[in-house]
Image (cartoon, rainbow, N blue to C red):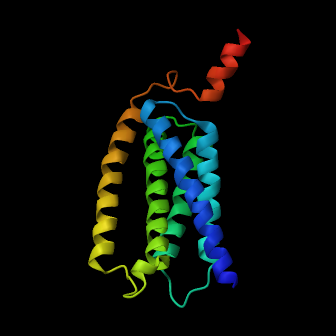
Amino acid sequence: MIVSILTYICFGLELIAIGAGAMALFGLLTGVLLNKWTVLFLKCSLATGVTALLIPFEHFTLTQEASMLSVYGAGVVVLAWRKFQLMGVWRSIFAWSITLVLYLNIVVAITQVSQRISLFKPPIPSRFDLPFITTQSVVLAIFLVLGIVVVNKFSNKSTHALRSRRDEVSNKHAL
C-alpha cells in the first residue's frame, strides 16, 4: 500500500517537474531565465528524486539510479545559479544541467509508465528490452541535441542581456 502511494506521488511530482522543466528550458532557449518555472522545476525534481529513493525495491532500479543522478544534477544547477551567479563557465554548466535533469525526469517517467501500463505488463519490461532501449536512445539523442542548442543559445548571452522575467517586470514598474 505504501509503495503504491509513494509511486503515485512520485509520478505526479514527475509530471509537474517535466512541465515546469519544459518551460524553464524554453526560457533558456530564448535567453530568458524564468525564475518561477526553474524553481518549481528544481523543487519538484528534488521531491521526485527523494520520493523515488524512498520506494523499497529488491534491487537498485533504473528509476532510483536516474532519480539519484537527478538530485545531483539539481544540486549542480543550484550551485551554478546561486553560488556562482552564472558567471563564466557556470552559465554553460547551468544550461547543460537543466537539460540533464529534465532528461533524467523523462527517463524516470518512461520507466514508471512502462512498468505500470497493462499493455507492457505481460512480458515485464526490463532495461535491456529492445523497445525500452530504443525509446531511451531516441530520447537521449533528442536531449543531446537540445542540450547543445540550449548551451549555445544561453552561453552566448552577455551577463547584462540575461535577465529574469521578474527583473524586467520590476524595472517597468520602477519607471
In this rendering, would 78 be left or right of 139?
right
Residue 73 seen:
yes
- Along the line of sight, which residue is nearer the eye, 95 or 90? 95
Label tally: 0
Q: Position of residue 91 (x, y in %)?
A: 47, 38
Residue 68 image-quadrant placement? bottom right
Considering only vertical position in the picture, is 9 above or below 101? below
Which quadrant: the C terminus?
Answer: top right
Considering only vertical position in the picture, is 114 above or below 151? below
- Along the line of sight, which residue is nearer the eye, 97 or 169? 169
In this rendering, would 30 be left or right of 16?
left
Residue 122 image-quadrant placement? bottom left
Instruction: Give the residue at the far front of this rendering.
Output: 119
Which quadrant: the N terminus?
Answer: bottom right
In this rendering, would 60 be left or right of 16?
left
Residue 83 seen:
no
Which residue: 52% across, 62% down? Answer: 70
Which residue: 73% across, 13% down? Answer: 174
- Along the line of sight, which residue is nearer the eye, 88 or 44? 44
Q: Position of residue 62 (x, y in %)?
A: 45, 76
Which residue: 44% across, 65% down? Answer: 107
Q: Position of residue 8 (x, y in %)?
A: 63, 71
Considering only vertical position in the picture, is 87 above or below 131? above
Instruction: Give the residue at the far top of this rendering.
Output: 175
Which residue: 67% across, 16% down? Answer: 171
- Along the line of sight, which residue is nearer the eye, 8 or 68? 8
Instruction: Give the residue at the far right of this rendering.
Output: 174
Q: Position of residue 142 (x, y in %)?
A: 32, 53
